[in-house]
C-alpha cells in the first residue's frame, strides 16, 4: 500500500515541545514510506539542545531566531519569515506542531498560508481565559482554528474540541507523548550530587517561568518559599532556573544567600525527571510538569490561577494555589506538616496516557496520508 513516499515536517522550538515531539519524531522515522523532516525555530537554544542530544535526533533546519529578552512579535515575525522558505523548498504533505507556544502558533499560520494540512499534537487543552496562561491560550486556540488533525491527549481535551464544533472524525484521543518520554528517562540507580545534598532532607523541586508571572507574582511565590524554608529545617529547595534573565534577577534577589535553597542551571530532561522522582513536593507554574507528576505520584502545588490540565487535579496529585504569598505559604506548610494531607496527594495516576501516544499518532498519520 505504501508505494509513494510522503513527507511530514515537524516544527518545534522550545524545551517542552522538544521533549514531547522527539518520541514522536523517532516513531515517524521508523515508519516505512515516510520522510520526517525537522525544522527547529530556535525559539530556545541552550535549553533545547540537550533534549535533541538525549534522543539522538538532528534537525534538518534551524531558524535560529532566539534573542535575549525576546518579545512575542519578534518570535512571531522571525519564525513566519524563516519558515516560509522551508515550506517552499520542502513542500511537505503534513506539518506537525505541538502545544501552545508562539512557535506552534506561527508554524500553524505559516502552513495555513501555504494551504498545507496541520496536525496538532496536544490539541484541545483549554482554560478559556485568554490572559491565563498568556499567550498560550491564544496560541493553542489559534492552532486549532486551522488544524486538520487533532491529537488530543485526553477525553476532556477531545470534548473541548467537539464543543467548539471541530469535526469528530478529525479528533483522536492519543494520550500525551510526554509519558512516552518519561518511560525512557526515570532510572532506579540514578545518582546526582545535588540529590546527595538533599539526601537527609525533604526535597522541594521548584520551577517558575510563565510570562504572566514575571514581576510581582513571581516575587510573591519566591517570598512564600523562602519563609517556609526558614521555618522547616528538614526541607531543601532545588531550583533549576529558566534562562530568562527576568526570572533569574528576581530569583537571585529573593533567594540569594539562603542556605537551604540552591539555584542551579536548567537540567537536562533525564536529570529533571529523576529529580522529580526523588522529590517530596513539586512547586511549579509549568504545564508539562503537571502531566508528568501524576505518573510519579508526586504532589504538585501549581502556582497559577487556572490550569488547562484538570485531569491531574481530579486525580488528586495537583492543587491550584494561585500566586499570592499567603496562599502558597499556607499550602506548602500544610503539605509539609500534615501527613494525611501529604498522603492524600501522593497517589500515582495516569490520566495522560500509557506511554504509547507516539505509536498511535503515527498510525493515524499513515491512515491520513495514504
Ligand atoms: C516559552 C513559551 C512558553 C513555554 C516555555 C517553555 C512562548 C510565548 N512561550 O516561554 O509557552 O512554556 O517556552 O520553557 O512561546 N532563553 C535563553 N536560552 C534558552 C531559552 C530561553 O537564554 O535556551 C532566554 C532568552 O533570553 C529568551 C528568554 O529566555 O529571550 C525567554 O524565552 P521565550 O521562549 O521567549 O519564553 P519562555 O518563558 O521560555
Ligand atoms: N524540564 C527539564 N529541565 C528543567 C525543568 C523542566 O527538562 O530544568 C522539563 C520537564 O520535565 C517538562 C518540561 O521541561 O517535561 C516542561 O518545560 P517548561 O516548564 O519549560 O514548559 P511548559 O511545560 O510550561 O510549557
Image (cartoon, rainbow, N blue to C red):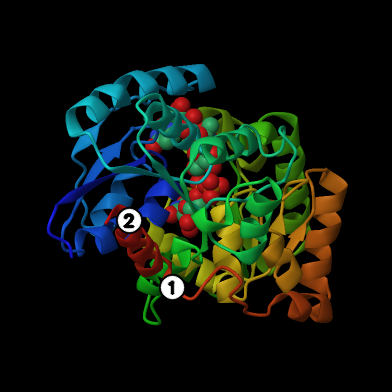
Question: Residue 250: percent from the left, percent from the top?
Answer: 63, 33
Residue at 50% over, 63% down: 176
Circle 2 SS class: helix
* Residue 237 visible in the snapshot: no
* Residue 135 visible in the snapshot: yes
Q: What label does residue 220 carry, if any?
A: none
Q: What label does residue 22 carry, if any?
A: 2
Q: What label does residue 355 carry, if any?
A: 1
Q: Which quadrant, please, contains the N terminus?
A: bottom left
Vertical side of 14 occupied by 336: above or below: below
Viewer-side residue, 333 vs 167: 167
Viewer-side residue, 136 vs 174: 174
Residue at 49% over, 33% down: 105
Vertical side of 155 occupied by 245: above or below: above
Question: Quadrant of residue 318 in the image?
Answer: bottom right
Q: Give the spatial CA distance, label 2 vs label 1.
A: 13 Å
Q: Which quadrant, please, contains the C terminus?
A: bottom left
Amino acid at each position: 500500500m505504501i508505494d509513494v513516499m510522503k513527507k511530514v515536517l515537524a516544527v518545534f522550538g522550545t524545551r517542552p515541545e522538544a521533549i514531547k515531539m522527539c518520541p514522536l519524531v523517532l516513531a515517524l522515522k521508523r515508519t516505512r514510506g515516510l520522510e520526517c523532516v525537522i525544522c527547529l525555530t530556535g525559539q530556545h537554544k541552550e535549553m533545547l539542545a540537550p533534549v535533541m542530544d538525549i534522543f539522538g535526533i538532528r534537525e534538518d533546519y534551524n531558524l535560529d531566531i532566539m534573542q535575549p529578552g525576546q518579545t512575542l512579535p519578534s518570535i512571531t515575525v522571525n519564525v513566519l519569515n524563516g519558515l516560509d522558505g522551508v515550506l517552499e523548498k520542502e513542500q511537505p504533505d503534513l506539518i506537525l506542531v505541538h502545544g501552545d507556544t508562539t512557535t506552534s502558533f506561527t508554524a500553524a499560520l505559516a502552513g495555513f498560508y501555504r494551504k498545507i494540512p496541520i496536525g496538532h499534537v496536544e490539541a484541545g487543552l483549554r482554560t478559556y481565559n485568554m490572559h491565563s496562561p498568556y499567550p498560550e491560550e491564544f496560541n493553542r486556540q489559534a492552532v486549532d482554528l486551522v488544524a486538520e488533525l487533532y491529537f488530543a491527549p485526553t477525553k476532556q481535551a477531545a470534548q473541548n474540541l467537539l464543543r467548539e464544533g471541530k469535526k469528530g472524525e478529525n479528533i483522536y484521543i492519543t494520550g500525551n507523548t510526554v509519558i512516552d518520554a518519561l518511560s525512557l528517562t526515570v532510572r532506579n540507580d540514578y545518582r546526582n550530587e545535588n540529590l546527595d545534598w538533599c539526601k537527609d532532607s525533604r526535597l522541594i523541586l521548584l520551577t517558575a517561568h510563565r510570562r504572566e508571572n514575571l514581576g510581582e507574582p513571581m516575587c510573591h511565590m519566591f517570598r512564600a518559599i523562602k519563609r517556609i524554608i526558614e521555618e522547616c529545617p528538614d526541607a531543601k529547595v532545588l531550583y533549576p532556573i529558566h534562562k530568562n534573565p527576568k526570572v533569574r534577577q528576581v530569583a537571585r534577589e529573593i533567594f540569594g544567600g539562603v542556605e537551604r535553597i540552591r539555584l542551579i542551571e536548567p537540567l537536562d530532561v533525564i536529570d529533571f525527571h529523576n529529580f522529580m522522582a526523588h522529590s517530596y513536593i513539586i512547586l511549579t507554574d509549568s504545564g508539562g510538569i503537571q502531566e508528568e507528576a501524576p505518573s510519579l505520584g508526586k504532589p504538585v502545588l501549581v502556582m497559577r490561577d487556572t490550569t488547562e490540565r484538570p485531569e491531574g487535579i481530579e486525580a488528586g496529585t495537583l492543587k491550584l494555589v494561585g500566586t499570592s504569598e499567603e496562599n502558597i505559604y499556607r499550602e506548602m506548610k500544610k503539605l509539609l506538616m500534615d501527613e494525611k494531607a501529604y498522603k492524600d496527594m501522593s497517589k500515582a495516576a495516569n490520566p495522560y496516557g500509557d506511554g504509547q501516544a507516539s505509536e498511535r499518532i503515527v498510525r493515524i498519520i499513515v491512515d491520513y496520508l495514504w
